[in-house]
Image (cartoon, rainbow, N blue to C red):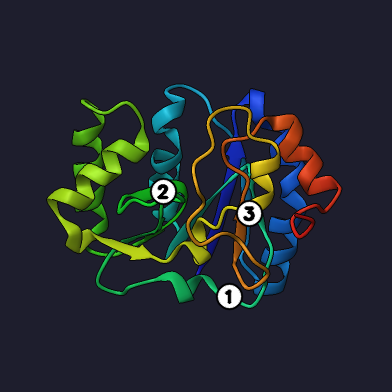
Amino acid sequence: MKTLILTGASESMADVSAASLPSKQKYCEIKNYDLKVITLEGRLEFERPLQAFKEVKNYDVCMWVDADAVITSTNYNIEDFLDPNKPFSASLDWTDVQTISMGNFVIQNTNKTSELFNKYSSFCENSTHDQDAMNCVLNSDPELINILPRKYLNAVPSIVKEYRVHEYRDIVDPWDESCFLAHLTTVSNECRIRIIKENLLTQV
């Protein structure tokens, strides 16, 4: 299976992307996956899936991994996250909801991928960002989307509680060392870089 890990960020997140990149490089080297780093431009709030849809045309599978996500376990293969009947896979969001997160996701190149792209694109017109649009797809056609537990693609570590500057919400299924990645969402870039560079994930 020809697989691509796609990551990147806007210029404002470039330092975070650089800090998390070694974890993605190591993972791709071990698994023999391709890795591509891009700079997001244009309609940033919709650009991640559009770039992944573009890249998956040349692959069997394309996984997007956010700049503020660190791959923490090499025990998983991308195939572990797939449903052969559903072209899109993503984890539940980190709070107590039944919506999916768009920070990290997988698109498969199947006979349903074009249908998924068309539905996503149509919902973008009346959505504020990619997560809204893809959750509209989930509500309208759940057979296109594989919903994963948070431990795979959206495990938020408890340490973010130490750095949050706005009202804190409980983390459901927080990151531990068995999770595929740690998603450092909702904190400043400075704090994200410190957590990564000082290896603070387990120090809570």
Q: Is residue 1 visible?
A: no
Q: Quadrant of the C terminus?
A: bottom right
Q: Amino acid at mark 3?
A: Pro
Whether residue 173 is situated above or below residue 188 in the rendered picture: below
Residues under numbered marks 3 and 2 in contact, where contact means CB atoms less than 8 Å apart: no
Distance (Cα) linking label 3 and label 1: 19 Å
Residue 179: % across, % down: 60, 68
How many labels were placed on the picture?
A: 3
Q: Residues within 10 Å of mark 1 (few under 14, many from 20)?
A: some
**Kind of element beneath mark 2:** strand
- Disc 3 versus disc 1: nearer the observer: 3
Distance (Cα) linking label 3 and label 2: 15 Å
Q: Residues within 10 Å of mark 2 (few under 14, many from 20)?
A: many
Whether residue 34 is situated above or below residue 21 in the rendered picture: below
Q: Is residue 13 left or right of residue 106?
A: right
Residue receiving disc 1? 76
The residue depicted at 68 percent of the width and 57 percent of the height is 24
Residue receiving disc 2? 101
**Kind of element beneath mark 3:** loop
Residue receiving disc 3? 157
Q: Amino acid at mark 2?
A: Ser
Q: Residues within 10 Å of mark 3 (few under 14, many from 20)?
A: many
